[in-house]
Amino acid sequence: MLIDASGRSARKAKGDESATHKGSIEDRSDDQGNLNYYKQVICRLIDNDSFTVDFQPIMSAADGIVYGFEALTRLASTVDHPFSDIGDLFRKARETEFIASLDLHCRSNAIHEAALLGIKEREAYLFINICPETLVAAEYRVGIIGEIADKCGLPKNKIILELPEQAAIENYELFKKTLVHYREQGYKIAIDNFGSGQCGLKVLATIEPDFIKIDRHLISGIDKNMMKFNLVESVTTACHRIGIKVIAAGVEQQEEVDVLVNMGVELLQGYLLGRPSPSLAVNEALFITVGRAKTGGIKYDENAARHFNVIGDICRKVDSICPADPFSKAVGKFSADTGLRGLPVVKNGTVYGMLHRTRFTEQQILGRFGYGKYLNSYKDVGAVMERHFLLVDANTSLETVAQRVNAREAAFLYDDLVVTTHGKYRGTVAVSDLLEAMTERSISTAKNSNPLSGLPGNVSIQKEIEKRLSRQIQFDACYIDLDHFKPYNDHYGFEKGDMVIRSLAGIISDAVNAVDKNLFNFVGHIGGDDFILLTRPSISVTISEKIVQLFLSSMPEFHGIQDFEKGFYTSINRKGEKEKFDLLSLSIGIVSTEVSKIDSYAQLASIATEVKKLAKMQKGCAIIKDRRISAHEGSV
């Protein structure tokens, strides 16, 4: 829909005088109350060309230059009309079945204005909103937009037609055929407001667009909201795998840019980068915001590769080959590099296939009777590549990848696997490298484990937290502390104290597995009676409550039935005096990175200390989640 990016009518900004004058017309429309009246008004607006066009820049995240402009139609501020805004006008046009005429007029205006302003000389794309109803309307003549573009000297391959996701498309087959015609003419297709409607995946599968523009609701605050982050990242990854470019709409904060650029989103649009304007002039100074994200933002730490956790830590960039390259080029690459086991077939970052040295040599170069090279010499790589291969995302854990490798057929067990980041080619991993990494990681983990609990110790904990922070993975850190442990040790003995520590380590692990068996979770032993759990924000409290439940059920074993039933025990304190002591309890302080920006391990530990103090002030077992986030607290 051709709506002002601000969502406001330009007329409303003109003040009370305009609003009062407009009100008299609205009263008249209410009196007549029929669609014919609105149809007459729409006809008058079209005949008098009562519209203006603004252009909002869409910026490339890769190089910080303008990729294109979206044309936004607005009602001229000097014209009287009964519509609250441009969106209301289009709604009435649909009701009066006058949408095709209005839509065509607006698109014609957009092309004329963009051409007059010199968009062709800027080598930028023109994004034009289009109503799906227009494409299948009986009175709409296919090709008329092309005629207008030709007259204005604007190449069709520089025009991108934006279709709103939420639009109801009744005849998908007819609609798809119409889009095929437009593509054959050179136009590109985009889905607008993706994520705001109810039929996004159906529209995506039907249209197979060149671009999708993610709705501003999902972009706003993406740096603080894990749900939005995960949804946008998943959509971005899926689109990259099938060659669709992603546009993030409604970008208004630098922090949003940082996240989106690091996520791999190609194009950005929003008030932070440029507001709609009647000209194609842009403030280049605004684009430094992307430059900062590219140079000063958090990036993948190559030094962390020795701490192998995910497959991206060990992948290596192998030069790829294009599907359209000749067969001889693949032969040459394998001949030039005797250590090359697998050659990825990649186009525009998307992996289409693989060439594996052994089978490529046996089946394509030699062939059944030794004539393979001769018979394949006229073919391109796409004709001889293998389309079934193991493709994994860079953030997949080593254990998960190992399971997938082990599930392959014996003939393919030792094939190199391909690694992608957000659906784009990143590199390959040999199975031998995977096994070596898992072995080295196991040895390293054993060295850094706490000898009493067997859980990862401080070195591993700090590395895990820093890794998650550097990759902008949102998580909750649950700091778990045993209360009254020193007098317990003095009274019951160190051997019993060690038993409690080992039991608590098992309780935490059991609680995690009971709630969420997921490799995202991490349990560590800080030392003494302090433990830490890293988990998803949505389940941190649930797991903590499960830990408390299991801990309380073990209290008779920890204290003995007699002391447990009394609810206290009497012992000699360090002054040599008899004193009543409370039974063991747990204090759990939860710190979340979901809405609080945490940049370092030290900062996280500092906040955790404050929250844990609040928990220890409660009677009995207590769970407190950072008050600045959710103010959740409770005691058991």
Image (cartoon, rainbow, N blue to C red):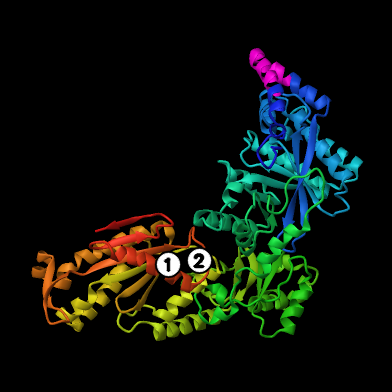
At mark 1, the secondary structure is helix
Q: Which residue is mark 1?
A: 607
Residues under labels 2 and 1: Cα distance?
Answer: 10 Å
Q: Is residue 209 above or below residue 526?
A: above
Q: Local crowd at mark 1 within 10 Å, few (<14), some, or many (≥20)?
A: some
Q: Which range of residues does the magenta coloring cover?
A: 22-39
- 366 versus 626 height, above or below: below
Report which residue position mark 2 lands on.
598
Q: Is residue 463 left or right of residue 130?
A: left
Residue 477 shows in this picture: yes
For this view, does 565 lie left or right of residue 80?
A: left
Q: Answer yes or no: do the residues labelled 2 and 1 have beta carbons within 8 Å?
A: yes
Q: Tell me residue 345's x, y (percent).
A: 69, 69
27 in the magenta segment: yes
The amino acid marked with disc number 1 is Ile
Is 628 drawn above or below residue 509 in the view shown?
A: above
